[in-house]
Amino acid sequence: MTEYFTRDGSPYPAKVGRVTYGRNDDKTGFGAYLPRVCGRCGGLGGADKWKHTGWTCYQCNGSGRGEPRFTPAYTREQLDRLNAAAAKRTCAAWRAWFKKPGTKRRAKGAQCVA
Ligand SMILES: [Zn+2]
């Protein structure tokens, strides 16, 4: 069985499949809808600074839960490829910076292998 991961490399916490997402359900991707914490109260359901309006978070109504959002799932190989490409981009940017005239030459961080 294939193992799936989130973009940051942690094991995917749910069953994955092909799902539609996007504002008009106009995109499809491999992954699942994962629950998220409320973006306004951070999952607390309310805050003391909102006391004057009744404490409860108006976005989640006090549940602390936000809208589930499509979260893509990756296989180990896909993740490795993405990370390698990202490292390459970072290295290219770093090398470009390093070549710029007037840039202070510093040995620190010079070993870019990607
Ligand atoms: Zn909330």
Image: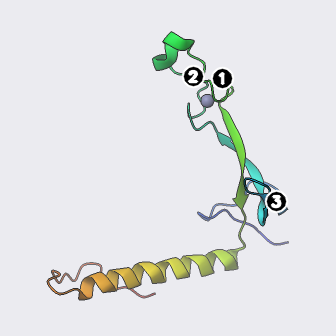
Q: Which residue lies under the disc numbered 3?
A: 20
Q: Which residue lies under the disc numbered 1?
A: 62
Residue type of the residue flagged with mark 3 = Thr
Q: Is the residue 72 above or below the residue 105 in the image?
A: above
At numbered mark 3, what does the secondary structure look like: helix, strand or loop?
strand
Q: Residue at x 56, y 33 (%)?
A: 40
Percent position of residue 28, x then y: 80, 65
Establish whether ligand 1 lies closer than 8 Å to the Cβ of label 2: yes
Establish whether ligand 1 lies closer than 8 Å to the Cβ of label 1: yes
Residue 10 or 91: which is nearer the viewer? Answer: 91
Horizontal placement of 87 versus 13: left or right? left
Label 1 vs 2, first from the N-terminus: 2
- Which quarter is ligand 1 in? top right
Badge 1 vs badge 3, beta-carbon distance below 8 Å: no
Q: Which residue lies under the disc numbered 2?
A: 46
At numbered mark 1, what does the secondary structure look like: helix, strand or loop?
loop
